[in-house]
Amino acid sequence: MTEHIVRIKSGVPGLDTVLCGGLVRGASYIVQGSPGAGKTILANQIAFHQAMKGEQVLYVTLLAESHERLFQSLATFDFYRPATIGRNVFYLSLFKVLQEEGLRALISTLRNELARHRCTLLVLDGLLIAKDKAESALDVKTFVAELQSHAAFNSCTVLLLTSAHHDDVSPEHTMVDGVIQLKEELAGIRTMRQLRICKSRGSEALGGLHQYRISGVGIDVYPRLEALLRTPSAEEWSVQARVDPGVQGFGQLVGGGLPPSSVTLLTGPAGSGKTTFGLNFLSMATPDSPALYFGFYESPQRLRAKGRALGIDLERLERSGALVILWNPMTENLLDSLGHELLETVRLHRIHRLFVDGMMGFQRAALYPSRLVEFYTALANELRGQGVSTLVSLEARDVETLVGPEHLPQFAGVMDNLVYLRHATIDGQHRRFIGIAKMRDSAFDATFHHVSIGQGGLQVANRLLLPGGPEITPVFDTGSQNFHGS
């Protein structure tokens, strides 16, 4: 018979997801990381979350610093609840007991305090200091084993905090049920914080490194999207009519509209009309079929002003609940944080249309660019499964002619549809053009067409005819992922 595992919620956003449900009740965990990685913040965030649920928590420090300094630091975080201290959370310094009487006295004191307060969570901050008092590896194992025994008797979960280097593997690692590693490093000039579950005895966990952030709310963990959504959470491919992109004349090129629940990559150089195309796409949203603008370049104010200039009333759409605007300036972002924010907004507002204005924002946030294909695959599959029709724009290098090859990024194969926007100078006039290279399970017009931008946004006009020459007909080579004119 399989024994049911009882878990407790940590109160740390994303951590329970990485732990596949939360901490195991009665289990012991080492929380390991260099000074400043956030071990104390993590442990206290869990402690106060348990306290707010009415649980009893014993927080033991083996450090020389006073608890007053600890409370001053914790007071800067939203999770801090001073009213629970002495009622549900009990802080106890056993530094002197350890220094003067050793590990045996420490174990005895911990056993008495656990029984006295009937604690369901024990945090021991300073395991490295306790190890220094041990005479051998056997003493360390004995200490951890006795502590686990007393805690398990009371169904008490144990967190042992240590400042050991993240690559260190010590005798106590073999004794505990789980090891949570917090890692802080520099990636170029940026700080990179990553969490890893190194050990999870008898329980699943999402493997690999997961980014986390420390802010005023505490620690937020962002599970890697490609690990969490290895397969999409839903695969309900609803049979819908084709999706009107809102661009006059474009529907005629693609059989009436875009395939439903598909992802369209719109690529072109700056000024070719990508954002305008996206605003036309968003303008078709309704309160029953809302849309999301997820952008990196345009602030909400600038985006609304752009809409007014084009005769697209974004404010009206927002007021009616038909449109949600999210802006993440392309400064310092975390790739998985962006992905989770996007998907949470899609689910919360039941989004039907999504315009991601600037795939470069994801690329610049990726500390490991080699994972982008997997990230985009997980994101695209989840959006399709949620029934979202998605348009994403990508800045392309400036192409002065329509016949030169345009090299697509590696992730282009993830996209269902590929649409090109170009501009060129012909007969002394600057002109814009649109071409379709791929449309999922659809027939489409593969010739370039003129594009104009004015009141109403972007409009597709007649086919392109070069003076004295034939029509330009694009051919897409899926093997080399190059775009050619012929």
Image (tube, rainbow, N blue to C red):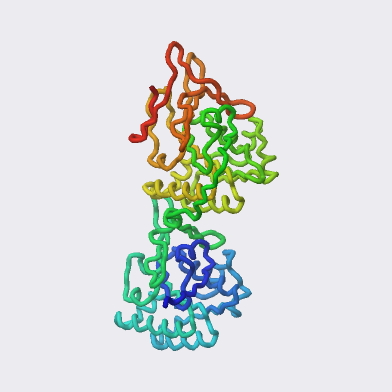
Residue plotted at (49% across, 58% down): 213
Residue at the farthest top position: 468
Quadrant (top left/top right/bottom left/bottom right) for the N terminus: bottom left
Q: Quadrant of the C terminus?
A: top left
Task: Tell me the quarter of the picture where residue 72 sits.
Answer: bottom right
The residue positioned 49% from the left and 84% from the top of the image is 154
Using the image as rendered, state which of residue 354 and residue 87 is in the foreground: 354
**Residue at point 39%, 24% (across, down):** 485
Towards the viewer: 19 or 367: 19
Direction from residue 38 to residue 48 in the image, left or right: right
Q: Position of residue 259 (x, y in %)?
A: 52, 38
Coordinates of residue 322 in the picture (x, y in percent): 65, 44
Left or right: residue 378 compared with residue 299 = left
Quarter location, residue 54 = bottom right
Count of numbered labels shown in the rendering: 0
> Residue 424: where, in percent of width, then height?
47, 22
Q: Is residue 96 above or below residue 224?
A: below
| 297 sits left or right of 170 in the view | right
Residue 427 appears in the rendering: yes
Answer above or below: position of 15 versus 379. below
Instruction: From the viewer's side, name the closer residue of 135 and 431.
Output: 431
Q: Is residue 394 visible?
A: no
Give residue 235's position: percent from left, percent from top: 49, 52
- At 48% across and 24% down in the image, what residue appears? 423
Depth check, front residue: 121 or 385:
385
